[in-house]
Amino acid sequence: MPSLPELDWDDTTDRVNATRGLIDRLEPCVVRNEAGRVVWDNDRWDFLTKDQCPETVHPSLWRQSGLNTAQGLFEVVPGIYQVRGLDVSNMTIVEGESGVVVVDPLTSKEVAAAALQLYRRNRGERPVKAVIYTHSHGDHFGGVLGVTTAEAVAAGECAVIAPEGFMDHAVSENIFAGPAMLRRAVYMYGRSLPVGPEASVGFGLGQALSTGTVGLVPPTRDIVRTGQELVLDGVRLVFQLTPDTEAPAEMNFHLPEHRVLLIAENVNHSLHNVLTLRGAQVRDAHAWAAYITESIQLFPETDVLIGSHNWPTWGREQVMRMLTEQRDAYAYLHDQTVRLMNRGLTGPEIAEEIQSFPGELGRAWNTRGYYGSISHNVKAVYQRYMGWYDGNPAHLWQHPPVEQAKRYVAAIGGADATVASAREAFEAEDLRWAAELLNHVLFAEPEHLAARELQIATYERLGFAQENGTWRNIYLTGAKELREAGQEKRAKGAPRGESVDMLAALTTGQLFDSMAVRLHGPRAAAHRLLLRWEFTDTDEVWTLLVGNGVLTPMKGDAPDGEAPQLTLHLERATFDRILAHLISFTDAIGSGAVTMDGDAGVLATFHGLLENPARNFPIVLP
């Protein structure tokens, strides 16, 4: 295991700051839903602070994970509090004249309610006067119904503040690729792994995501420009918009009277992702760095820096150092990648050239790659500018993985000979090459037992060595799934019920767009269907045209006056419940919740052309 002598292991600043201001803890730190199911258990991570770092965990990741387990209610400065360790993210509470402003109400309703209850038992029953979403990722808004209600917001008792574009991105960023992202998130976050020194120890930015009820209340007010100010329950806030940084809709804000800057997820005690390994749109590292520079210029009167993850930073000098180091990390990744790209290097080649930050930047704890890594961030910067193709004609039209694997294995002399070469690489500690060779064997001959066993050992050894928590989780999840060897059965999946609260936040057009990417085009090409949808509670009319293997949603009637084959009458709320798999179309029709005029067979034909996404498609086997 590397000793990492360049890091100052005697520096206790982060350890002190992670527990500074502790007022109260949740004992035990376990949260359950109404049915009694555990949706959060922070106590399972206790070994990270009680035991010594074992050989199976990178010592720097062990340190980071232990810091992330600190839980409870913390005072940042008088009037500003954070609840940490009840989810992957932090919930910040700002006291006003008669109530509180809640910032980023965690991932799910149950943990957000537990966090607010912990605050109230120490600070009193102050009503929630406003909720602020700093950005459009679910772990910063999904628990809103644990701190307020849609009725309170509708009545004007609680304002909801978000950056411009929040709703579009909050509900649509993952709508098309959501199933694939969720499957890969199992690997990235280690969701199927047990917790322990030989399994998951967190993923750098936090330990895990809560698994309770996710909801969304739309904002009542948007922040549309940098410098915009609001006074919420007597508290003055100055906002800075930072779009296309860590999220497509994101903002920071300053609390001048407290001299506190809330930096959202733009600055963390870890290098973040320019492209998440679960999949997403590539973020703009250049803009990210520029917005941190703007933060430094806009808010020089800052004594405390707090964020949506990890722990605060106190002291103006320390705050400016943190901001500068984080800014320079993203700028360095961008600028040096582009420099080498313009010398003709490809993404993987650049990643080999840039393996660390130089000088003091490389010795800073907050720029370590616990969550995002230098390697995959460099490749993401390259991808943003150049795309998937590296310019080499040999890579323009390659065989897909299984066909490649068969040909590689045959060229090497068969599966057994390939495994023998992989074993030599494994024993020589060339684990990357061993994994590559074994992957070819397993894609050519999935039942090859020796290849499977050696690949499990290779992935485990690679995982144990990683400073990056997500890389560790990915390797160890791959090993786990190879060991279980049940990919074929799980790949079939089943309809996945979405949160009806989240579906209700989608526009009707977005719902139909999500159906369009489920249409089986080759089968649909044999049909021309026209369905008219009348939503009686929203007074919306939509027409769906299926033709040429494409589903085209149109608001209103068909533009050429073509008569629909079928008209459906239903409430939008009923449609949401059908899509959430709470009721079926058949049951809704039987109960009268859906009525129809025309050829009822058209609905059956249409429904039969929609494909349910696979929940657990194979990754480490074909």
Image (cartoon, rainbow, N blue to C red):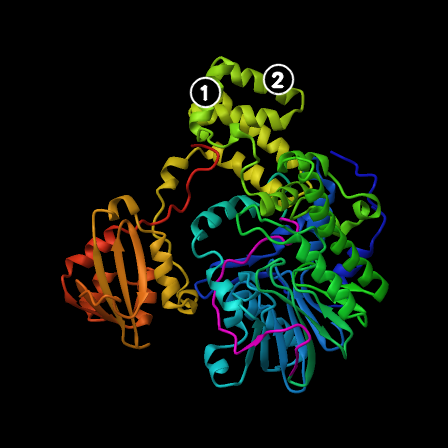
* Residue 469 screen position, x and y as percent: 64, 45
| Residue 296 can be seen in this image | yes
In the picture, the quarter occupied by the C terminus is top left
- Residue at (51, 63) in percent of width and height: 169
For residue 603, side relative to residue 170 (left or right): left
Total labels drawn: 2
Q: Which residues are magenta?
A: 203-231
- Residue at (47, 50) in percent of width and height: 182
Asked if residue 373 is positioned above or below residue 511 in the image, the reply reads above
Nearer the observer, 359 or 385: 385
Q: Label 2 belongs to which residue?
A: 424
- Specify the principal SS of the magenta part: loop
Q: For residue 268, which numbered disc appears in the image?
A: none
Q: Secondary structure at mark 2?
A: helix
Nearer the observer, 565 or 115: 565
For residue 123, side relative to residue 194 (left or right): right
Task: For label 1, count other residues whose C-alpha is less than 10 Å away and answer few (under 14), some (14-19) or many (20+).
Answer: some
| Residue 49 can be seen in this image | no
Nearer the observer, 17 or 398: 398
- Residue at (67, 57) in percent of width and height: 288
* Residue 344 screen position, x and y as percent: 66, 35
